[in-house]
Amino acid sequence: MSTYRFASRQQLDRQLTARVAKVLTSDITETGWAILVVSGGRTPRDLFHALSRAEIDWARVWITLADERWIDGEHADSNQRLVRDNLCIERAAAARFVALKNSAISAYQGQSDCAKALATLGRFSMVLLGMGDDGHTASLFPGAADLARGLDLDSGIDCLAITPPQASHQRITLSLPRLLNSRQIVVHIVGAAKSELLAQVQAGRDVYEYPVRGILQQSKAAVDIFYAD
């Protein structure tokens, strides 16, 4: 694992866009398609805009999410809406999007159909993840009732419903083993506070304390950290 530190967020976005383009293009050349997994939140918004203009054969790219709130796709907090409005535009409008949210009333009722949708995708080309202030990634939250199942590398599941201890919505999240079934993972971090948290994360081993350790402290997939203040 390598950590790349950048003087500005704009420089990070340029370099990470180039990395994503290289990985996706390589998979398109080798297999005919590529699969990009992205996360929500405020951090990747500018990155998404940069990616949307990248010279990638987007018609051969599938995009899906690392996690999603179980809310309508038009809701302001929907990751699907974030991706639609900020990534699947300009050149990237040609990409095909696989939603995690479906018509089920709850995430728990919808996880089976979500798993079926994910089963149509093979190994991911690139997974872009964030790190929350509590050390969560995707929707693998410390203290969540189903966290152990989500982190179990032998679970055999691609996704699971989860209710964060302090959140207003149920979530659907990719499991740790499904996230690790990727050619490349990048953890995208910005801000001085996150740098301090990252040092704490890297100093320990308890994955239940900081679930992002499940990504950073494994040997199944290539992982890099991209950081800027």
Image (spheres, rainbow, N blue to C red):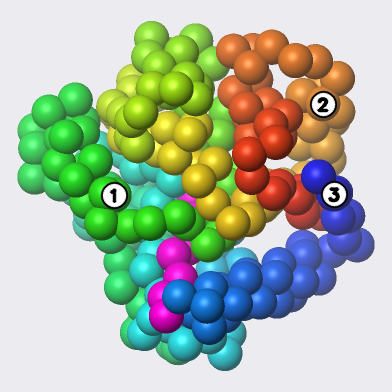
- SS of the residue under disc 1: helix
Q: Which residue is mark 1?
A: 118
Residue 33 on the magenta segment: yes
State the quadrant of the N terminus. top right
Q: Residue at x 53, y 83 (%)?
A: 29
- SS of the residue under disc 2: helix
Report the amino acid beneath label 2.
Gln
Q: Nearer the viewer, mark 2 or mark 3?
A: 3
Q: Residue at x 57, y 28 (%)?
A: 136
Q: Which mark is residue 202?
A: 2
Q: Residue at x 46, y 13 (%)?
A: 148
Q: Are marks 2 and 1 in contact (CB under 8 Å)?
A: no
- SS of the residue under disc 3: strand
Report the amino acid beneath label 1.
Leu
Does 200 sit above or below residue 128? Answer: above
Does 133 sit above or below residue 64? Answer: above
Furthest residue in direction front, as rendered: 30
Secondary structure character of the magenta stretch overall: strand
Does 30 sit above or below residue 8? Answer: below
Left or right position of 146 against 119: right
Tell me the crowding category of disc 3: few under 14, some 14 to 19, or many 20 or more residues within 10 angstroms, Cα based.
few
Q: Which mark is residue 43?
A: none
In the image, the segment drawn in magenta is 32-39
Tell me the crowding category of disc 1: few under 14, some 14 to 19, or many 20 or more residues within 10 angstroms, Cα based.
some
Q: Work out whether residue 114 can be spotted.
A: yes
Tell me the crowding category of disc 2: few under 14, some 14 to 19, or many 20 or more residues within 10 angstroms, Cα based.
few
Q: Which mark is residue 2?
A: 3
Residue 21 on the magenta segment: no
